[in-house]
Image: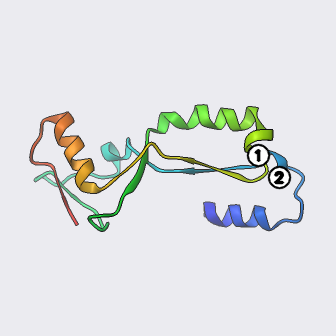
Amino acid sequence: MKARIESYIRAQQDPPLFPYTTFIHVGFYYQNFQTFFQPTTDFEFRVVLQPTARLPLYDVHDTGPIVVQCFEHPDRWGQGNIVPIVAERLTMNEICETIRRITGNQKIRYIP
């Protein structure tokens, strides 16, 4: 839906608010691992991703300050600019390794 909205806005002939328009493209929230992905009882993440695929990740709390900058400086960030918000790109195996290191739970693993 977001891509359709962006396409619609870009297709308009000189929309009056376009100078103030910024498209924010966000990665996958780190916080989703607490709610979106629920590991099985064996602590397995079953996700349909290629093992080498890198998931763009960031902290949801980083969104606000970036959006504020876009509102306060439309001369810099407007005109239909795309602002990606991504802190890092990790594979699911790298994500599981990070979760194991942080939680101490060595059973956590990724099953493609």
Task: Measure the C-alpha gap from mark 2 to mark 1.
Answer: 7 Å
Q: Amino acid at mark 2?
A: Phe
SS class, disc 2: helix
Q: Residues within 10 Å of mark 1 (few under 14, many from 20)?
A: some
Q: Of residues 102 and 31, which is closer to you in this image?
A: 102
Q: Of residues 85 and 1, which is closer to you in this image?
A: 85
Q: Residue at x 21, y 34 (%)?
A: 102
Give percent across and percent down for residue 72: 75, 32
Please tell me whether residue 79 is drawn above or below residue 5 in the rendered image: above
Colour scheme: rainbow
| Pointer 1 residue | 78
SS class, disc 1: loop
Q: Is residue 20 left or right of residue 111?
A: right
Image quarter of residue 70: top right
* First of labels 2, 1 by sequence position: 2
Please tell me whether residue 3 is drawn above or below residue 72 in the rendered image: below
Which quadrant is the N terminus positioned in? bottom right
Q: Amino acid at mark 1?
A: Gly
Give percent across and percent down for residue 111: 19, 63
Marks 2 and 1 close (CB-CB < 8 Å): yes
Give percent across and percent down for residue 84: 57, 49
| Pointer 2 residue | 18
